[in-house]
């Protein structure tokens, strides 16, 4: 059995004139939400063996907020998590996930598309919450019977979907 933790970056501020979207930092509520989600992950024993993180500033700052509260395992950064589609995310997961657990910190709409695509079944409440969208600092916990190298559309089970509003 393996677990995939899909975390959308926390809330970022608007880009200042001349600033690239890639470089937008978290705002104060985003920093607080990242820390809160890290504490929630620790208390629920959602501790990844490895983390794949977008190189975008807001994703890296989300990782920093989590890491101040819980262990994030070995961290690898990928530019592709900023621009890839859900299929690209899944390829990164298959190539870097192995067995155990993996946290991916990325962006929407890819996170939402991926969570919906890989979750063939799931907890009714979690699925209902996810169907309303994937808010910033939202966390989908998807369980797979095998390792993540064999993760595919419809093969996972959505165990939990947490949002900052739930904490």
Image (cartoon, rainbow, N blue to C red):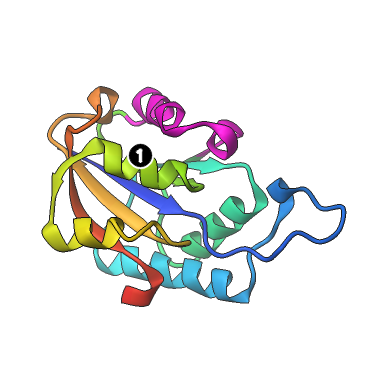
What residue sits 64% from the left and 70% below the top? 27
Where residue 151 appears, x then y in whole percent? 25, 28
- The answer to which of 158 and 41 lies nearer the viewer is 158
Where residue 55 appears, x then y in whole percent? 62, 42
* Magenta stretch, main secondary structure class: helix
- Helix, strand or loop status at disc 1: helix
Where residue 36 appears, x then y in whole percent? 43, 73
Query: Which image quadrant for residue 2?
Result: top left
Q: Is residue 62 visible?
A: yes
Asked if residue 86 is positioned above or below residue 115 in the image, the reply reads above
What residue sits 12% from the left and 34% below the top? 145
Residue lying farthest front? 132
What residue sits 37% from the left and 41% below the top? 113
Q: Is residue 95 magenta?
A: yes
Q: Is residue 77 magenta?
A: yes
Split into 4 quadrants, where in the image is the C terminus?
bottom left
Q: Is residue 103 visible?
A: no
Split into 4 quadrants, where in the image is the N terminus?
top left
Asked if residue 93 is positioned above or below residue 73 in the image, the reply reads above
Query: Which image quadrant for residue 124?
Result: bottom left
Q: Which span of residues is magenta-colored?
A: 76-97
Residue 78 lies left or right of residue 51; in this view the side is right
What residue sits 57% from the left and 70% below the top? 31
Q: Return the residue at label 1.
A: 114
Asked if residue 123 is positioned above or below residue 85 in the image, the reply reads below
């Amino acid at each position: 059995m393996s677990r995939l933790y899909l975390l959308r970056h926390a809330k970022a501020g608007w880009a200042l004139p001349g600033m690239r979207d890639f470089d937008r930092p978290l705002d104060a509520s985003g920093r607080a939400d990242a820390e809160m989600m890290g504490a929630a992950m620790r208390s629920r024993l959602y501790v990844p063996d490895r983390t794949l993180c977008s190189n975008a500033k807001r994703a890296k700052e989300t990782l920093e907020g989590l890491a101040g509260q819980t262990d994030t395992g070995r961290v690898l950064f990928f530019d592709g998590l900023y621009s890839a589609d859900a299929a690209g995310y899944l390829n990164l997961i298959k190539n870097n996930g192995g067995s155990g657990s993996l946290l991916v910190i990325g962006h929407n709409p890819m996170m939402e598309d991926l969570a919906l695509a890989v979750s063939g079944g799931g907890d009714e409440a979690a699925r209902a919450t996810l169907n309303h969208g994937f808010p910033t600092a939202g966390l989908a916990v998807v369980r797979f019977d095998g390792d993540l190298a064999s993760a595919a559309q419809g093969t996972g089970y959505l165990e939990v979907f947490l949002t900052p509003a739930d904490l």
